[in-house]
Amino acid sequence: MDPFMKEALLEAQKGLEEGGIPIGSVLVHNGKIIGRGHNRRIQKGSVILHGEMDALENAGRLSASLYKECTLYTTLSPCPMCSGAIALYGIPKVVVGENENFMGEEELLQSRGVTIDVLNDHNCIEMMKNFIHENPILWDEDIGE
Amino acid sequence: MDPFMKEALLEAQKGLEEGGIPIGSVLVHNGKIIGRGHNRRIQKGSVILHGEMDALENAGRLSASLYKECTLYTTLSPCPMCSGAIALYGIPKVVVGENENFMGEEELLQSRGVTIDVLNDHNCIEMMKNFIHENPILWDEDIGE
């Protein structure tokens, strides 16, 4: 498994152990993780701390030029909010664990010049499928449905 | 002045008094403010707490159906991240204080069925113009440039 996706998956699993929604993300610059996080809807009552947002927030304030050399790894296809954050900061590449359980704004990001690499990793797929099956109302809340 | 835009402007001014970036927002449901906030980049070292995001976060976890009856007021045209959050939660209407100092993703939101009402209020315009003039580097950081 891709070593950075493995770290994003570990973040997702940490979220699950905390009773949260299992979506994890890491922000990578020059082969090094500079921010990591996971969805905190349950843990912090947050409506904005999706996994990708948490990773970006934990990376702290960075220069615009640095974002433009980063790759964001996320276990699940990025929703409109997280895709907007990727677009805002000009992150040029996103590696997606899977888009079978949820298809985010991949087309929009691609139209803005972002490279999207979808792994459809079976660990990511199974984890999310099980969570959605067991927590359909919570999942709907997280994606505004 | 529109009473809700006035409240968003008060939030922006509060941010300015705190040494922050003066962008404020309120989330309104059935004529009542249910969330309010302002940009917290400086105050909290946050890269995700734009004014609109702070207002949504402070409103807390809401049902999908409630978001769909809300109007979001913001002193400045919403950036890609905040527009993505508006799209995620299906907020149907956004009232924008001004889009002269910064043009956000208004076209994208409109293409998704969101009603955008731009006031181009002179208080909002002057406040932002002065801030950008005095803090160009900080402003560029906030919009990923």
Image (cartoon, coloured by chain):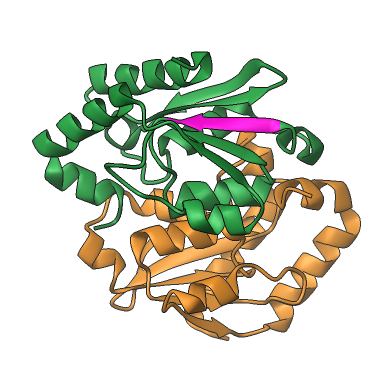
Chain colours: A green, B orange
To which quarter of the image does residue A45 belong?
Answer: top left
Is residue B9 something that shows in the picture?
yes
Could you tell me which residue is drawn at 44 percent across and 63 percent down? B86
Q: Is residue B74 above or below residue A129?
A: below
Q: Nearer the viewer, residue A5 or B125?
A: A5
Q: Quadrant of the C terminus of chain A?
A: bottom left
Residue B124 in the image: state x and y as whole percent. Answer: 69, 74
Residue A126 in the image: state x and y as whole percent. Answer: 22, 27
**Residue A73 highlighted magenta (yes or no):** yes
Q: Nearer the viewer, residue A53 or B53?
A: A53
Could you tell me which residue is drawn at 44 percent across and 22 percent down? A8
Q: Is residue B5 above or below residue A119?
A: below
Residue A139 in the image: state x and y as whole percent. Answer: 22, 44
Which residue is most to the left? A134
Is residue B36 something that shows in the picture?
no
Could you tell me which residue is drawn at 38 percent across and 15 percent down? A10
Q: Is residue B75 above or below residue B31?
A: above
To which quarter of the image does residue A80 belong?
Answer: bottom left
Residue A91 in the image: state x and y as whole percent. Answer: 66, 41
**Residue B94 highlighted magenta (yes or no):** no
Could you tell me which residue is drawn at 79 percent across and 52 percent down? B139
Q: Nearer the viewer, residue A27 or B89?
A: A27
Question: Magenta part mainly helix, strand or loop?
Answer: strand
- Tell whether B66 sits left or right of B104: left
Q: Quadrant of the N terminus of chain A?
A: top left
- Tell whether B72 sits left or right of B103: left
Q: Which residues are magenta?
A: A70-74
- Tell whether A53 sits left or right of A41: right
Q: Is residue A104 above or below residue A39?
A: below
